[in-house]
Amino acid sequence: MLDLKTKPTSVAGPLGPVTMDDLPSSSTTYWTARRKAEVLAAIDGGLMDFQEACARYSLSSEELGAWRRLLDRAGVPGLRITNRQRLRDQYIIG
């Protein structure tokens, strides 16, 4: 029997439903907290897998993993680049 895996057409994102068309362009170089959260929501919801996201956005697995840890620890505001050093000091050093 043929086992077909289907991907969802949309998943819950930080500001509402996210589809593949809603995701940032593969040429994105400026990452806002919302864009990072949308990519993580797409991974969590099954729109794409971790390796697909790394390849599509030219991200290292370490960088994408860091986004995941920041989101888990501090929510979407934790993904803001301006919060990165403060959060790093608070959660890693402190």
Image (cartoon, rainbow, N blue to C red):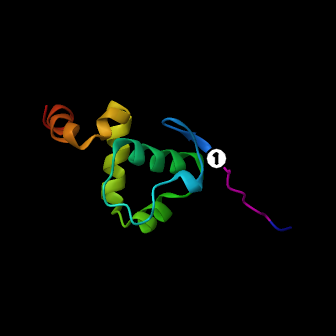
* Badge 1 amino acid: Ser
Q: Which residue lies furthest to the right in this view?
A: 1
Apparent side of residue 83 relative to residue 12 in the rendered image (left or right): left
Apparent side of residue 12 relative to residue 29 in the rendered image (left or right): right
The quarter in which the C terminus is drawn is top left
Task: In this rendered view, identify the residue nearer to me: 23 or 60.
Answer: 23
Is residue 4 on the magenta stretch? yes
Residue receiving disc 1: 10
Position of 15 relative to 24 (above/below): above
Range of residues picked out in magenta = 3-9
Apparent side of residue 45 relative to residue 39 in the rendered image (left or right): right
Q: Residue at x 20, y 35 (%)?
A: 87
Q: Tell me residue 39's x, y (percent).
A: 46, 50
Task: In this rendered view, identify the residue nearer to me: 88 or 10.
Answer: 10
Residue 73 seen in the current view: no
Q: Tell me residue 30's x, y (percent).
A: 30, 55
- Classify mark 1: helix, strand or loop: loop
Q: Tell me residue 66's x, y (percent).
A: 31, 48
Residue 11 seen in the current view: yes
Occupied quadrant, residue 69? top left
Q: Main secondary structure of the magenta part?
A: loop
Q: Which residue is drawn at 82% across and 68% down?
A: 2
